[in-house]
Image (tube, coloured by chain):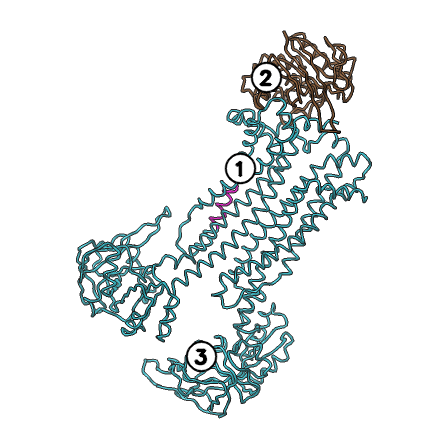
Chain colours: A cyan, B brown
Amino acid sequence: MKILIEVTKKNLKLNKKRTIVTIIGIMLSVSLICAVGGMVASFRETLFQGAIYQEGYNHLIIETNRKNLKILENNRDIKKIMNISNLGYSTLIGSQNEYKPYLKLLSVETSQDFLNFPFHLLKGRYPANQNEVIISNSIITNGRVNYEIGDTIKLNLGTRYACGKKVLENHYLPNDYKYDQDGKVVCEDENIVVSDTREVKIVGIIERPSYTYEEYSEAGYTIITTNLKSDDLKSYVILKNPYNYESIQRDLEDSNKFQKIKTNSDILHWEIFSFSDSTMSMLLTVSAIVILIIVVTSIFCIRNSFAISTLEKTKMYGHLRSIGATKKQIKKMVLTEGLILGLIAIPLGLFFGILADYILVIILNYLIGDFLNTNFIFTLSWLAILIAIFLGIVTIYLSSITSARKASKISPIEAIRNNQDIKINNKKLKTPKIIEKLFNIGGVIAYKNLKRSKKKYRTTVISLVVSIFTFIAMTTFMDYSFDLTGAYYQDYDYDLIISTSNLKDEDTKNILYLNNIDDYFLVYESSNYMAIKDLDHVTEYGYLTHIKESEYDQETNTFKDSKEINLSLLLLDDKSFKDYLKENKINKDIKNQAILVDYSLSYEENGKMIYKRVLDYKDNNLMTAYDINNQEFKFQIYKVLKEKPKGYENNNGIFLILNEKYYQDLKGNIKTLTLSSKYSDNLENEIKKLQLDINIVNISKRAKEEKSMAIVFSIFFYGFIAVITLIGVTNIFNTITANMTLRQKEFAILRSIGVTKKEFNRMINLEILFYSIKSLFYGIILGLIGSYLIYMGFTNGYETSYVVPFKAIIISIIFVVFLVTMIMKYSISRINKQNIIETIRNDNI
Amino acid sequence: MEILRVENLTKTYGKGLNKVIALDNVSFSVEKGEFVAIIGASGSGKSTLMHLIGGVDKPTSGKVFIDNCDIYNLKDDALCIFRRRQVGLIYQFYNLIPILTVKENITLPSKLDNKEIQSEKLKEIINLLGLEKRINHLPNELSGGEQQRTSIGRALINEPALILADEPTGNLDSKASLEIMEILKTSNKKYKQTIIMITHNLELAKDADRIIKISDGKIVEE
């Protein structure tokens, strides 16, 4: 038997190219599964660690008291309970934030538990006893009280009361305390009923705790001590088996002992993949498709290369049988071949899969690490590795066992006399007359050849179809996901935008004095509500979109037709107004005339987008509008334009644009200031230094982030497609070259009876043509179906029309023709090198 | 009329010590309508000679004229076309195209020339070969004799100047061998078809007009 294994090894070495290609095929399949799994695991781990950082590791958050705590302590499903007691509020002397006038003292009852909570020290250390506290950084940054480590705070702790009622919620004096049912003020203020007084020392400063620990509307800044216990506490619970969290939660709720049980949903998301049904089903569908594509291509590829290698060795197996090798031995040879290939390819595949993940993580951190809060974590997914190994082994085994059976069935004489693997009959090879008419006898031979090796032909076609399908469908997926998320910030020609009602005129001036500003554009929104009431000026389109059943009638609970169309007044400062006119090629100083912007994009049934008007005012018309008090305003329209002013690009509606200089009395509070700067990041920092209560959107930074996100997505998707295609290519390479080698003799015969090189190449080219047409036909149809389904999935709630992915289709056509041509040319060049006689005589015994 | 002239044909394989002289300065000529048998033992160089005459191999030196055309002066593609029009090849192992039917195999050389198939002519050949009932069968559905007859048909279809048959009966039983010989003889008599047949079977060679014996790459007897 040893000798047979030697023969197998030698064979693998002799057919070096095929062996290498097969190994590459197996390797790619294994590494793709491994890499995809690993990437998913890394994502999950990253998000999981992020969730732990943000929310702490626990599953349920239970509001309870001392008595009911016993119930939790006796619960067998609970692994660990960490308690935080609420010790009440104390007035924060000097708080600059009128919504947060208090300190709220919490106590992590066991000091060791600090590490299990998401309280992240910026300075100092955690408290060791009840006389020490850590304080939230936002006391300093937001409340502007300059506490430092080592300071002592005197706390007058107690419960908040207003109008004789306890303030239970976090809200700073809720409205239903303040007003009675008729809206009369009954209670101006709340007070704290002090029950405890103590002095604590600050030993550490932490980041502002997450909203789980200090709610958005919390009236007090958090300070935390330890060892103290009160009857008002929250238990943060770690479960033995988080997968059962729902039933455990239900059981606890049914006991009626606990007021409120919350789940730590971020942790549960990433630890046990608990998502809402729709998210889950989406995730499952996506992973099912991805896995299916990988598995199908891999199986095809591996299975195919084994079938080919057996086919090529039919003769050898026949010879071996004729000199006395048993069926069993032949079978073992084929299986050994599989074993050797697997032993080389699977570890290599795992290695490259993991390496690819590692490199991807590095690239991810480089590209998007800046704006992700945490770094991307590289993790090995043992499950993915196991699946990859298992799938590799199973496919190799199944592929080789069928080939082995086939090989063992070869009778010696059959193998020696005839190397035709498939019994063919004339019916199967029927060729339409049109083929001969169109392509002559060369076409007939080409066509029949494809029909003869139907199975091999099919594997090639399917490999191509899978690649084409994946490419087209994925491209659509990419296009739509970018359409919805991306390309949002890229088109703007300014870098910073501030849109707020908090910006006073002098602040605006201060901002505009700053260096680094290349240009600015300032828009005031009018606070007057303006409406067009003369419905004669409404177009048909306007009537359908703005008037018809657009107003909700509370009495009848239905929609009724509106009687007016809302008009937004935008007042541009003198400089911006002139810029705006210049941009729209109006060189006249139009002073107190108005520009009307009234073009809405509308989707037609044929999927095209066109501009439609809502009002029918034309250039130089006089427009009448009414404010909320029904006061009449008249505006002289100078021109109707499409272009909205800077900062309002994505706003819908009808805008009337005026020069602020001439309409001072219409000016409102809301300002939108856009700034252009070469050094937008510096400018942003400078503005922040002015310490205004405004939100600055850094467009160029966002655009950069978007671009990085787009790159990341592209790396993932195109990487995936590339590997899938590569697997397909190894498959196609194997099939076509094998087919060529098997037909060597036929080619030689054709040459010997006088087929010229040119005619011969033409014949092969026709084969390429038939191959490509068929695979493109199915690939494109399936791709279009896939892409349409993706479109349907994406357009739930979004009004985008389906665009046939022509670019992807054209690319796949070029790609397929190129690929098949290259491989065939390679085979032909090898065949053409061969001597006719050698080949013909080769098989003569 | 002289249809084939072989001038000082030499073919060697390998170099230096490994050099093998397969054909050593062979010259002879064949008249139109002749039936020539070339005999010789295994390894005597007779197959090499035939491949050189057929234009599928290249000589080390010397020339081959078919119908006064120096075939090795032709470019590759031109030689190919010349071969399919002027030379019919018959091999020991038939070498039919497995995916084409008997009829398609026979008409293949003419179809390659985009010539209209004269059905009269085709019918005549098929009758001669006795393949009337087999024309729509594929090679693997035929017996060895039938396959060889098909390959004779393929050689005859273009009315070549010369038919080269390399051990045409080498793989057949004696009955089928006789049939093949009958067909070759008939085509020689009836169509004045020039035939050069290579064989090591002296019995078969006796049917020929002329016998050329080759040994160690040289003509030893004529």
Given the image, on which type of amino acid does mark 1 rest? Ser
Residue position for label 2:
B85
Given the image, on which type of amino acid does mark 2 rest? Arg
Which residues fall within the magenta stretch? A774-789
Given the image, on which type of amino acid does mark 3 rest? Ser
Identify the subunit bearing mark 1: A
Left or right? Give the position of A55 relative to B60: left
Spot the residue most to the front. B16
Residue position for label 1:
A772
Disc 2 and disc 3 on one polypeptide chain: no
| CB atoms of marks 3 and 1 within 8 Å | no
Q: Position of residue B218 (x, y in %)?
A: 74, 17
Nearer-the-camera pick, A103 or B212: B212
**Within 10 angstroms of label 2, few (less than 14), some, or many (20 or more) residues?**
many
Quadrant for residue A221, please give it. bottom left
Quadrant for residue A405, please give it. top right
- Please tell me which residue is depicted at 29% across the width and 57% down the height of the picture: A548
**Within 10 angstroms of label 1, few (less than 14), some, or many (20 or more) residues?**
many
Residue position for label 3:
A138
